[in-house]
Image (cartoon, rainbow, N blue to C red):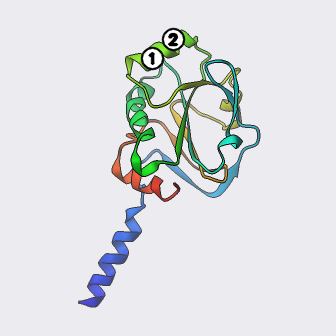
Amino acid sequence: MRFLILFIFLTTNAFANDVSEIKNIVIHKDLKVHDNVIFLDKNDKKINIKEFNGNLLILNFWATWCEPCKEEMPSLDRLQVNQNLSNLKIFAINISQESKKKVDSFFEDLNIKNFDPYFDAPTTLAKTFSLRGVPTSILIDKDGKEFARIMGSIDFNDQIFINWLKTYN
């Protein structure tokens, strides 16, 4: 009986942080370091992710014409205010050099209120991160190292994903 209880406890804990069910997540065995990750805010002010060391970061690359981006953006918005992830900062970076008016309309139409849009001009980060499409989300730990990426859309409110992400918070 003790063995059975121990087995159940160990397997439950082992799978508590398993995100293998979410097919789009790639977890890096070797963490990646990126230098000079700089993008622009709405006022063309340069933002460098080094200013946010100590925070868990999600760099979400997207475009207004991207249907999967539209689908995932509301759950990403809710993730930003998840109380279990108080150290999380989300940067939604538009990579298609769309007008700020078009980007603002996109955010309004989807009722995105918990983070602002950012811009990658002239698409240097797409090259830096070797993006193959949008949406792509880069997950960066408190030390500024990429530990995972999500290629394609996911439900950012998936409890399995949130529990896994909490281990990095």
**Looking at the image, which residue is at 62% across and 34% down?**
131
Give the number of callouts. Answer: 2
Where residue 167 appears, as percent x and y from the top left, is 48, 59
Where residue 129 appears, as percent x and y from the top left, is 66, 38
Q: Quadrant of residue 18?
A: bottom left
At numbered mark 2, what does the secondary structure look like: helix, strand or loop? helix
Quadrant containing the N terminus is bottom left
**Looking at the image, which residue is at 71% across and 43% down?**
50
The reply to whether discs 1 and 2 touch (Cβ–Cβ < 8 Å) is yes
Disc 2: CA contacts within 10 A as few (<14), some (14-19) or many (>=20): few
49 or 6, which lies in front? 49
Q: Quadrant of residue 58?
A: top right
Residue 106 numbered mark, or none: 1
Amino acid type of the residue tagged 1 in the rendering:
Phe
Residue 17 numbered mark, or none: none
Where residue 134 appears, as percent x and y from the top left, is 53, 30
69 or 113, which lies in front? 113
**Looking at the image, which residue is at 45% across and 20% down?**
107
Tag 2 residue: 102
Where residue 139 appears, as percent x and y from the top left, is 56, 46
Residue that protrudes farthest toward the left in the picture: 1
Q: Quadrant of residue 118?
A: top right
